[in-house]
Structures are given as C-alpha cells and as structure tokens.
Amino acid sequence: MSEFLNARRRSAQTFSCPGCGGRPVWDPATRQMKCPFCGTASAIELDQTPPTEYPIEQANDASAQDWGEVKRVMRCEGCGAQTILGKDETATLCPFCGSPHVLDDQSAAGIAPESVLPFAVPKEKAVSGFRAWLKGKPFAPGKAKKLAALGEISGVYLPHWTYDSDTVSQYTGLEGHWYYVTRTRTVTRDGKQVQEQYQERQTRWEPTSGTVSRRFDDVVVAGSERLPENLLQRVQPYNMNELCRYQAGFLSGFTAEKAAVDVHTGWNRAQKRIESVMHDMAMRDILSHADEAQVKSIVSKHSRVRYKLTLLPMWLSSFQWKDKTYHVLVNGQSGKCGGEAPVSPWRVLALVLFILAVLGVGYYFFMMNGDGGAVIESFDMMFGY
Ligand SMILES: [Zn+2]
Ligand SMILES: [Zn+2]
C-alpha cells in the first residue's frame, strides 16, 4: 500500500505545466491545478478514500517523511514559527507574526500528512471577507486598521493530529447507597414547642471496582501552537467529510506550518482527553447500580493506537500594533472570518460621550413633553447607529 502511495507521490513530484513547463499551483476556485504563467489548467485527483493511519509504535520523526517533493523549512526569527515550502518557493513575511525575518532552517519537514482539506476559498474572497471584518471594528484605531489592511494575507495549512485507540480502563472507587434514618426535632407550632419526627438521608459507602472500554476514532489534537485556541475556535468548524488524500499539488502556492507539537506529545494530549471520557464512563458504570459514585483510581490501556497527520486550510493575516501581534483568520474552507483588533480608548470615549449626549437630549425632551416617548426613540436611534 505505501509503495503504491510513494509511487504516486513521486509522480506528483515531476508534475509541471503541459503548456509552458512552469509550476502549477492549486486553484481553490476551480479545484484544479492552474499555471500562474500561462493559465493552463490541469486536473488533480481528489481522492476521498479514507487516509491510511499508522501504528503509534512506528512513529518517529524519520518515519513517513515523503512529502512527494523536496521541501524546505523556514524559521521566523520573530516568533519561531516553522513553515514548510516547496524547494523553489520563498517566504517574504512570516504568516504568524508578519516579521520579514524568515530564514532557512536546516531541520527536516517531519512526518508527512496523510490527508488535506484543500483550500476552497480563493485569496480575493478571503481578502474581501477580511476587509468586511475590519470595517465591523469601530473601536480599532484608524492607523491600526490601515496597517492591517496593508498586511499580507497568506494561505497556510495548519497541522492537526488524529488518534484512534481501543481503550480499556480499570477503575476503583466507592459506590454510595442511600438509606433513611428517623430523627426527632423540636419545632414551634401555634406558639408551642412540639417534637416531630422526620426522615434524614444517609449514604452508605462501599468499595467498588470495574472495567469500562471504548473505541476512539479520530481524537483531534492541534499540531500548531502559534495561534490562540479561542481564536481558532472562532472560525470553526471544518467539514472533515471533504478530506482528500495528500498530494504535493494541494500545497503548491501555499505554505504549511511544520507541526510544533510532535506525534508523541500529541498522543499524550489525546490520552488526557480520552482519560476524562473514561472517567465519566466509570462514574456512569457505578451509578448504574448505586445512588452516588466516586472514582478513586483509573488505569487505562490503549491498544491498536493509530495516528495520522491532517492539514487544514487557513488564510492568515498578522499585524503588529504597539508591540503586540494581532491575528485575523479566514477559514480556508468555509470563508468564516474571526480575529482580534486593538481597541482605541479615544473611540470608546467618543461613543460614551455620544451616548451621554443622546441621553441628555432625550432627558430634555422628556422634561419638556412630560412623557417618556422621546427617550425611547433616542435609544432606538443610538442602537440603530
Ligand atoms: Zn504554463
Ligand atoms: Zn513569525
């Protein structure tokens, strides 16, 4: 199987424009390869059969490094991001921080991806989405907006690890069973002190243990650490049903980030998530025959663990404002836009003054007319703005 894949990748390596011999790039608009020199289009196979997943025991940085063509790794002196490009391609600005200090790095490109979600949003569409987003930020300083608008927007594939596992967890804990005891208390009724009986709930705890198991499929762990998690969440989701088997052509004209999280660190993170699912399962297991549950210890065994690396498309623009880096993201599949922008205190103050002025005018009319209608209308005006 891997022989077959390697053969196909090698053939992709020699891929060149049938019109002029130039290097074609992936065109998101037409979903085929297009030559940037003469415009000749050529087809690329969009193979959606499930990608191969590899046993974790075999994973090391030297394994599965066939990217289908020679790659160079660049390193940003500003933020440390490592990006992967074709050997003839150059990066002028770091897509993660906007720094021009991007240098050749001697490290290898690392484990090659098995699947890719090819870019579906063309650059022009990403730029107009980005401009619209910027317009919707009334509190950003004008200068920062100009700076952001000038910033280069680059198409970057962000690495994601996925893990499968058969997990069996043995747990020990306590199961609690409720019982009721009759107690007596003194209450005041019609001004008299009387004794009354009531039921009080108690829990009898007994040690318990058991086994829970589950098959996990595609636990996703981000391989990038350059972008804040909450920012990435804003442009989710991706439709993973459109994943294609990796081919070097999809990356032509784009860059990929080299996974900052290696395959084993990613697996450790996936295990933490699996562990919390198993903990919940153990709780439910105890509660199936008890009223309360406590899990004291849990030991999990993972077998048939498999991983793969997937690349997801992101348009990325970064700009510096007062020593801080701001990012604007456009989902390369859906076009969903999200980002962060500085807030100008002057613009906020201007709005506060405006609101106070509107309220002042409203109050004036309220006093003149003796009814509250004018105030309500003023509020409408304010929010309409
Ligand atoms: Zn050509
Ligand atoms: Zn950088």
Image (cartoon, rainbow, N blue to C red):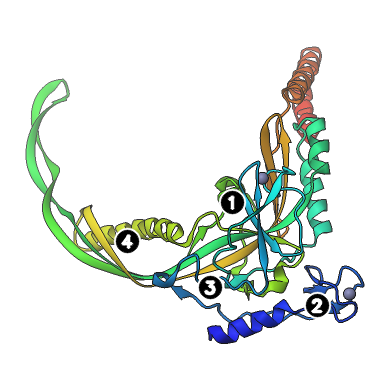
Q: Is residue 230 above or below residue 65?
A: above
Q: Mark 2: which amino acid?
A: Ser
Dot 2 or dot 1: first in sequence order is: 2
Q: Nearer the viewer, mark 3 or mark 4?
A: 3
Q: How far is disc 3 from disc 4 in space, using C-alphas?
A: 31 Å
At x 28%, y 63%, the residue is 300
Q: Is residue 67 above or below residue 299?
A: below
Q: Is residue 145 above or below residue 152?
A: above
Q: Is residue 88 left or right of residue 204?
A: right
Q: Which mark is residue 16?
A: 2
Q: Nearer the viewer, mark 2 or mark 4?
A: 2
Which residue is under mark 3?
Answer: 64
Q: How far is disc 3 from disc 2 in space, using C-alphas?
A: 24 Å
Q: How far is disc 2 from disc 4 in space, using C-alphas?
A: 50 Å
Q: Mark 3: which amino acid?
A: Ala
Which residue is under mark 1?
Answer: 233
**Does dot 1 land on a helix, a strand or a loop?**
helix
Q: Mark 4: which amino acid?
A: Met
Which residue is under mark 4?
Answer: 278
